[in-house]
Image (cartoon, rainbow, N blue to C red):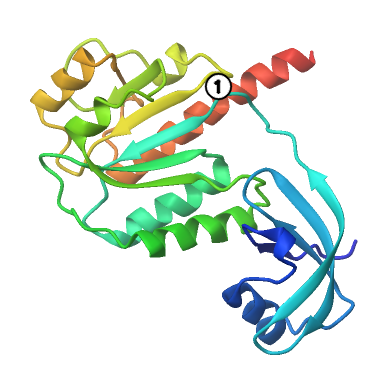
Amino acid sequence: MKEQRFFYTPAPEAGQLPADEAQHAMRVLRLQMGDDIYLMDGQGTFYRAVISAADNHHCHYRIEEALPQQPEWQGSIHLAVAPTKNMDRMEWLAEKATEIGMDCLSLLDCRFSERRIVKAERLDKILIAAMKQSHKAWKPVFEEMMPFTRFIARADLPAQRFIAHCYEGEKPFLLDVLSAQTPALVLIGPEGDFSIDEVRAAEAAGFRSVSLGTSRLRTETAALAAVHLMRLANRRLIERLKD
């Protein structure tokens, strides 16, 4: 089977790949006029196209067919996390969560946060690369850093929202309380965890405290586990509906 080469272009109707994608196609992959390529707009549609003109810095194409994709689940998987001090771990999380299946990534500025500045452009490029690698039709929405108290007060948050933390108390396992096929949001704190006041404020704002298991997890591990559990809840329902 011929390899499908995917390129991200948020405006496929323009007929020309963005500069970085064009250079990758022409200088790295050494594609030529007449070669088939596949485009993704990050909004749910793939396109089969043919290179119509190109040089080392430009790649023009002709769209042959639009291929709308069907979402695997209804609703959305939303992760809100305080960035780690080591940015490599945050980039790893963004990549792997996109590959597993995540619809929105928000960054939180919490009381015990050790990183309050993030290069948003760099992280967004990682989301795009992971989307291409895993052949996802939708690019995760990326929301830049926001103070914790402002985030939990937002009016557009889903009704199904959770906060994972290490404090004692009644905390059901996330997978046991998730409702599949509906929007879900999970908050993951910094390496020093949320403050107790932040947990109480979140609960007062309608967030339910949950557990991600018996192990004490690093921030990026907990965040990836939360995405996986939200993805698994939706997958279980899909399999049941097939039976």
Residue drawn 66% across the image and 53% down it: 41
Residue drawn 69% across the image and 55% down it: 40
Secondary element at image label 1 = helix
Name which residue type carries label 1: Ala
Q: Residue furthest front?
A: 14
Q: From the top left corner, tell me how far across and down residue 95 is, in percent.
A: 48, 54
Q: From the top left corner, tell me how far across and down residue 92 is, in percent.
A: 42, 56
* Residue 222 seen in this snapshot: no
Q: From the top left corner, tell me how far across and down residue 98 is, in percent.
A: 52, 47
Q: Residues within 10 Å of mark 1 (few under 14, many from 20)?
A: some
Task: Name the one closer to the observer, 15 or 113.
Answer: 15
Residue drawn 41% across the image and 32% down it: 226
Horizontally, residue 221 falls left or right of residue 27, namely: left
147 up-or-down from 170: above or below: below
Residue drawn 63% across the image and 73% down it: 21
Quadrant of residue 210 in the image?
A: top left
